[in-house]
Structure formats: structure tokens, C-alpha cells
Image (cartoon, helix red, strand yellow):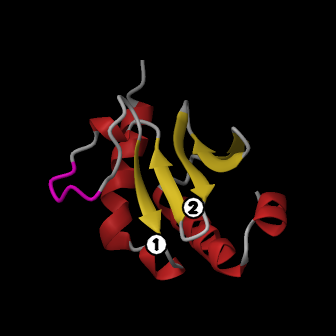
Amino acid sequence: MDEYVAAHLDEGQAAIVQALRAFMAIHAPDAREVISRGSPAWKGRQLIAIVSRSKTHITLAFARGAEFSDPERRLEGIGKTTRHLKLKNAADVDDALLSGYVRQAVELDLNEA
């Protein structure tokens, strides 16, 4: 993942991804950092979350986000499985915002048959 960050991200995007890496190390310690479909991702038994970049933000997509409880309706997306958040700066990698989603992603992955 270090190579991806150095080669593909500007300074602001890199700061967001580095903050995500630190966050995931704490909140999903058993998830492995991988490159999936050309992008940084975290994988347990299955893919948990993947990062993609745009000109204005980093997208953090949860592979099974459509199954999450999201009472505040912060997740975006309308597909059958994935939901995502747009992170515009490293401060958006916030425990209050992300910890519940990451916990659900890890629980769904652990309960995968």
C-alpha cells in the first residue's frame, strides 16, 4: 500500500489514506492491507473496505455496506451491496463517524459462512 500511496496520491489524499490505515489498524486489526482492483483495500475473509480517489476526495467503500445499520443515513450509494463515504481531509477519518461502520464490516466478515 505504501507504493500505491507514493505513486498515485497527492499530499492531501495521502494524508487521508494514511489516517485510514492507522484507523483500520486499531478498529480492524485482523484485516490485511491489500491492493484490490488497483486500489488500497482491507480484507478479512472477504473484502471489507476499499479506497478510491477522485479530484476532490477519497471514497471509502464498504463491500457489504448495504447490510449496515445506518440510522443517520450517512452512507451513499444505491447498489445491491456496496455503500461509501466521501472523505475530503484527514480530519474526516473520525472515530465517531467511522467506528460503527468498520465494526459492522468486521462483524459481517467474521460471520461469513
Give the residue at x 31% y 37%.
Answer: 66
Residue 59 to residue 43: above or below: below
The kind of secondary structure the magenta stretch mainly shows is loop
The three-letter code of the residue at mark 2 reads Ala
Where is residue 24 shown, x and y percent of the image?
53, 60
Tell which of 26 and 43 is nearer to you: 43
Can you tell which mark lies on residue 25? 2
| Quadrant including the C terminus | top left
Asked if the magenta segment contains residue 32, the reply would be: no
Query: Which type of secondary structure does the marked residue at label 1 adopt?
Result: loop
Apparent side of residue 62 relative to residue 74 in the rendered image (left or right): right
- Gap in angstroms between the C-alphas marked 1 and 2: 13 Å
Give the residue at x 55% y 30%.
Answer: 45
Furthest residue toward top: 113
Residue range corresponding to the magenta coloring: 70-74
Total numbered labels: 2
Residue 24 to residue 95: above or below: above
- Location of residue 6 (image quadrant): bottom right
Query: Which type of secondary structure does the marked residue at label 2 adopt?
Result: helix
Can you tell which mark lies on residue 106? none
Where is residue 53 shown, x and y percent of the image?
62, 60
Can you tell which mark lies on residue 93? 1
Tell which of 110 and 84 is nearer to you: 84
Tell me the crowding category of disc 2: few under 14, some 14 to 19, or many 20 or more residues within 10 angstroms, Cα based.
some
Where is residue 59 shown, x and y percent of the image?
51, 58
Apparent side of residue 37 relative to residue 68 in the rendered image (left or right): right
Give the residue at x 31% y 53%.
Answer: 75
Apparent side of residue 71 relative to residue 74 in the rendered image (left or right): left
Where is residue 104 shown, x and y percent of the image?
33, 45
The three-letter code of the residue at mark 1 reads Val
Residue 79 to residue 23: above or below: above
